[in-house]
Image (cartoon, grey):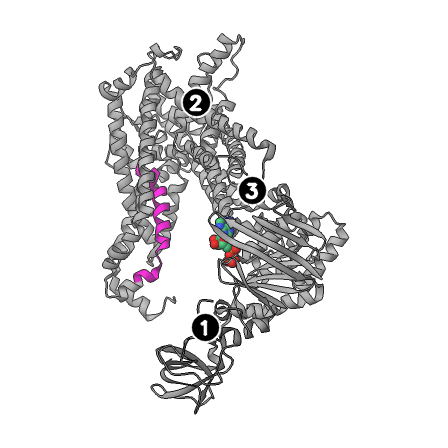
Amino acid sequence: MSPTSPTSSAIKKDSGFGAAQIILTLSIGILVVVVAVPVLLIFLNAFWDNNNDFNLAAVVKVLSEPDTYQALLNSIIIACGTTLGSTAVGTFFAWLVTRTDLPYKKFMKGMFLVPFMLPSFIGALAWKMLLSPRAGYINRFFMDTLGFDNPIFNIYSYAGIVMVEIMYLFPFVFIQVCGALEHMDPTLEESARISGAGLGTITRKITIPLVLPSILSGALLIMLYSMAHFGTVAVLGIENGIFNIPTLIYEKIHQSAGSFESIRTGTVLASVLVITAAFIIWMQNKILGKGRYQIIAGKSFRPMELKLRGLRIPLLIFCLAYIGFTIVLPTAVIFLVGALPTYGLPFTLENLSLENYKFILFDFKVTRDAIFNSVTLGLAAALITMFAGVMISYVIVKMKVRGKGILEFLGMLPFSVPGSVIALGVILAWSGKFGINLYNTVWIILVAYIARYMAFSLKANSAALEQVHDSLVEAARACGATMWQALRDIVLPLVRPGMLAAFFLIFLPSLRELTVSIMLYAPTTRTIGVAIYTLNEDGETVRSAAMAGVALILIIVGQTLINRFTAKHKR
Amino acid sequence: MSYVRLVDVTKRFGEVTAVNKLNLEIAKGECFSMLGPSGCGKTTTLRMVAGFEDLDDGEIHVGERLLSSKKKGYYLPPEKRDFGMVFQAFAVWPHLSIYENVAFPLRIRKLPSAEIDSRTKTALKATNLLDVAKKSPEDLSGGGKQRVALARALAINPDVMLLDEPLSSLDPHLREEMRFEIKDLQRQFGFSIIYVTHDQAEAMALSDRILVMKLGVVQQIDTPMNIYRRPANKFVFSFIGLHNFLEVERKEGAYRLLAGEALDKNLTPPQDLATEARLTLASRPSEIDFVDDGGISGRVIRKSFLGEFVDYQITVGEQTVRVQKGRRTQGPEKDENCRLQLLHPVWYKVDE
Ligand SMILES: Nc1ncnc2c1ncn2[C@@H]1O[C@H](COP(=O)(O)OP(=O)(O)O)[C@@H](O)[C@H]1O
Ligand SMILES: [Mg+2]
């Protein structure tokens, strides 16, 4: 449609210049207050010194201090290890469940997605209970029962951290590669077959190269996530002095109660995170934008399957063992330890009881508050972010107003700001600097959640809005509807699924949030994640496990309800 | 003489019988089309020949070689059959250059590199792709991509080329052009073609023989001319082009339109049908003339100008007939009465 055509200018005129401008301003305002100001304050604090001078030397000095330097290095080591491992594991399993005749593939696929639901710090807790060098159940079994002199594995190590992160992050690659393999036009592989290539050659020369963009994009996602990940390193690393960027920020802010030096170190580290994240996202967009081939088929029947023959049963056993080892075992340990009176006792029937569960659910104020806080915070954040997200996405995707470019830039920000950066940013912004002091209240956590989950909402809503073709609105206008009526009667019903998706995408993860809330909590504003983490820190391992068990049940029930609900709505 | 042979080939998908007891012989160098509506089992047949699907009954041979046999449980895998195949959705590999796409089957066969190069270039030249060989196939239009697919299938110089609706993703004008290119390539390289399409004009233009299929069952195998002139049944008649089916009944020894007037004396069914109480009289809209006397009487209820043609909707008794005449032909106007002469009618049993 040409912008000079009389109809389009007519539409613009009577749609009300004022309304569009108000929406745009409001959208920009939200993003500025919630995301841009905190990030800006971080950069300001990092790069400008007390005298308001730009001071790069000071930044370099902070970065070259041994502990910051080591934290940077650790983040990189852990992120690289996790990314490589998860990519290999995720790609292999994706190939296995889409391209071979492995038995029970549907079930396997479902199971490989379960780690998406499990918070990795709970997984880390479970692995600590299993493999901590002295007290871990597996290590103790080997030493006490089998007579080993030394523990077989020390989970408080780089290898331990990377292993646990792989277990809970590989689904990012798995799901991307599964999607690509399932939707790939099967004739791409069949034409290689008829050209004379066997299945092994096809996999190497056709299939893998074609899904490489999906593999890379999943890998970068994991990189991004792992760089900025707090939970696993906090649970498994601190014991042995392994800090990464987020745990060091946390340590600095917490220990020194907000001294200038520690805030400074925190902001420098946070800046590094933001810049790295922005770079990773830029790479990902480049790969997705250019490298993704049009390999999607219109209709696709069953693609070719590699006959595993003799390997079929061994691989089945391998998959089941993997699922048992990474999903069933840690989950079971959480529930079992939660049922013990003290950590370390054997799991005999007389040792197990529901006492801890009863205590944390009904008697213990800290955990009861935490559950209440997490649920209300989650609901509030999900609702607010959903509505803000649909409005902002509408401006970005659909409206033709001046000044949209600013919004598009601001809209990218939430994607590249990791949780610990947001937490630090809101501390800087909402601790009275601008006359409002939310520090030590739930409100600061709410603000941080909104900033943290805005990206999810923008993604879901703009995807939904892109499906609504302009002609639908134009048709409504042609039928005599005003702009507002068209929005209400045509656009809103069509994007409702996107809004619902955004709501759930925010509500569920916020139930298990740790990275942000750990930086912002006060004694009465603990969240579920904080409660689990602090109980564990305080040596209350069994209560921590019981609380983690409760959280798992909440998450699983929530996810099941949502799956039901969305399945019904699709039909 | 026959080169590709299908014997009693049957394929079922659960409840659906996609192909039922198909018997077929295709000569060396022949261009053979399989024609039928979507879902009738054409692709399934082709994929069984290619080796992508197992058989539920029957055997497939090419020359002396047995390719598939249900009874012997023997299936030569597709990569060993040495066919060329082209798919509807192009299926060119976007991560390889055009040259590498075409060279792929030769590299798989581990030919000496000089031979790979010369044969790749031959195939590229035959498909007019030599100039763009270094480019990515993503840079080409649909027609260009399909040329790459053709070149890749040609590279090994196959005896049999399998084409599954290769032109149906292309623009109509390109489609006609590519038909001739495929025909030229066949002349040049001498392979047999098994060509799947749902477009009867395409099948007519390309083929030495056509198989018409419906719900997995063969309806007719014949030359394009015979398929058009003497369709084996009403289904083939209607599938091959525009059609009129008039129901006629036998009364007092003569045939007349259902609840209508008697037919011309010279319009009589062939001997073997002459005893049926009811018959269908099939004719093409373009093969009906307006006459002054004789024929059957009708009344024009719609007359529309379609450019090349004038299209008439005419009621005869309780039935309607469609007639198409060149725009220069003098014809009746709307609401006028007229008389129609069917030029090459074909008789069918009502339920055939
Ligand atoms: N892999 C398959 N699984 C199940 N049904 C199939 C499969 N392939 C084809 N069919 C069915 O077999 C019938 C014939 O399909 P097909 O050979 O693709 O038809 P055509 O190519 O003539 O359009 C259809 O009913 C189709 O749904
Ligand atoms: Mg087909």
User: Does residue A359 appear in this view?
Assistant: yes
Amino acid type at mark 2: Leu
Question: Residue beneath label 2, please?
Answer: A329
Magenta-drawn stretch, dominant element (helix, strand or loop): helix
In the picture provided, is A136 more to the left or to the right than A384?
right
The chain that hosts pointer 1 is B
Question: Distance of mark 1 from mark 3, alpha carbons?
Answer: 54 Å
Few, some or many C-alpha atoms within 10 Å of disc 2 (few <14, some 14-19, many ≥20)?
Answer: some
Which one is in front in this view, the residue at disc 1 or the one at disc 2? 1
Image position, residue B58 (x, y; %): 60, 51
Quadrant of the image occupied by residue A535 = top left
In the rendered structure, does residue B11 fall within the stretch colored magenta?
no
Question: Residue beneath label 1, please?
Answer: B276
Please tell me which residue lies in front, A163 or B279.
Answer: B279
Few, some or many C-alpha atoms within 10 Å of disc 1 (few <14, some 14-19, many ≥20)?
Answer: some
Residue at the extreme front: B252
Image position, residue A270 (x, y; %): 41, 33
From the viewer's perspective, is residue B237 above or below residue A457?
Answer: below
Give the extent of the magenta segment.
A449-473
Question: Residue beneath label 3, please?
Answer: A305
In the picture provided, is A13 more to the left or to the right than B59?
left
Amino acid type at mark 3: Glu
Q: Residue at x 31, y 32 (%)?
A: A557
Question: Distance of mark 2 from mark 3, alpha carbons?
Answer: 31 Å
Which image quarter holds the N terminus of chain B? Answer: bottom right
Disc 1 secondary structure class: loop
Circles 2 and 3, Cβ within 8 Å, touching? The answer is no
From the viewer's perspective, is residue B143 above or below residue A188?
Answer: below
